[in-house]
Image: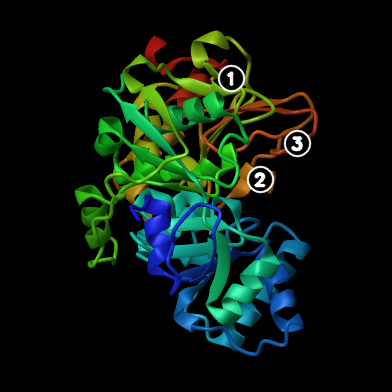
Amino acid sequence: MQHTLAQKILARHTDQEITEAGQIARCRVSLVLANDITAPLAIKSFKGMGATKVFDRDKIALVCDHFTPNKDIDSAEQVRVVREFAQEMGVTHYYEGGDCGVEHALLPELGLVGPGDLVVGADSHTCTYGGLGAFATGMGSTDIAGAMALGETWFKVPPTIRVLISGKLKKWVGAKDLILNLIGRIGVSGGLYKALEFDGDTVADLSVEGRLTMANMAIEAGAKVGIFPSDDKTVAYGQAHNRPNAERLTADPGAVYESVVEIDAAALAPQVACPHLPDNVKPVSEVTGVRIHQAVIGSCTNGRISDLREAAQVLKGRKAAKGVRLIVLPATPTIWRQAMHEGLFDIFLDAGAVIGPPTCGPCLGGHMGILAQGEVSVATTNRNFKGRMGSLESFVYLSSPAVAAASAVTGVLTDPGSL
């Protein structure tokens, strides 16, 4: 059988023959992930199962990134539970404090995920690692408890939608615009329990960081996974990030796809997802002039160094409009340090930004940027559900770093090309 990327990776991790979509396969996992919100639930289930040790202490990652640095007593207690479990089990990859970053930026940076891996995490945006050619997906905390104990879990082999993207991107149009446009086309349930496999000359031209951005939001289309081929760029990224044996990996010629979605990248303008769903997508030109109170640049979607450089390019020599709170959150300590050394912090501070630590922060309505009733935010995050960033009566627009930065300058939603 000729395999799609999703089928090919699953086949590597099971003793069964993968023959068709819908098949149930029992698979060995490469890494199991949880964070400070989801790990305590998984730990409770783990102990409730009678498990006494994890299957492999080197293949568990516990990252305390959501409500940290601890914002209150409850979050401190959550982290305490995770910390004590990590110590009890001898977990190698436990992160909090100064070596902790937003999990889906941190793990690729550390080389803990890579091409051909099968990764499960108690976080829906675990699908990010598909940008590196991994089959990576989120699961509930009980399933994660089982995976931590057994080192395996079961999957229903997903059908695959091939997303073929061709054409040269215009200035200020990038990976975030591509994935927003796709979600707008197929809807928040358009990829439900399916794999999105990205291909085409535009995809080949994307940086690995851009691919991680797109894979991150596959779940926003309901997809089980979003997967990119592993190519020379992926291999180079792996070699630079403690993954020297990263391999090239593509779908088999003649693989069967459920459907094909074609996108003309050259025709795209900067996109925004309007409240209150990620598929309510419009060109920013159609909503230009909407007043904002806050702009957030960061998260597991767009908190990497390339994102910060893009925002700085727009902000250099400019200031955030009066009445706009501009918040910048580099996604990991390494990115934070790199941005500082490159002088990006000077640009952000001169623009009137607040630069925070590597944390999920306001993305999930956690802390460091909560919205009040009636307030509007533009954010480089991945979700804009009602109440996602604070008040149920607030409004979140999702965008690229360039659009968020331009909007911070003008005080209204703005196409960066107009500055």
Does residue 172 show up? no
Q: Secondary structure at mark 3?
A: loop
Mark 1, residue position: 322
Q: Are marks 2 and 3 in contact (CB under 8 Å)?
A: no
Disc ID at residue 200? none
- Residue at 34% of width from left, 36% of height from top? 309
Does residue 110 show up? yes
Camera-side residue of 268 and 352: 268
Percent position of residue 277, x then y: 66, 30
Whole-number angstrom distance, CA of label 1 to CA of label 2: 25 Å
Mark 2, residue position: 364
Whole-number angstrom distance, CA of label 2 to CA of label 3: 9 Å
Q: Secondary structure at mark 2?
A: helix
Q: Compared to 260, does 18 lie above or below?
A: below
Labels 2 and 3: the sequence-earlier one? 2
Circle 3 Cα neighbour tier, 10 Å, few/some/many (<14 / 14–19 / ≥20): some
Q: Are marks 1 and 2 in contact (CB under 8 Å)?
A: no
Q: Secondary structure at mark 1?
A: loop
Q: Amino acid at mark 1?
A: Lys
Percent position of residue 43, x then y: 69, 75
Please count the marks in the image.
3
Mark 3, residue position: 387
- Residue at 35% of width from left, 44% of height from top? 209
Q: Which corner quadrant of the image does residue 19 belong to?
A: bottom left
Camera-side residue of 157 and 90: 157
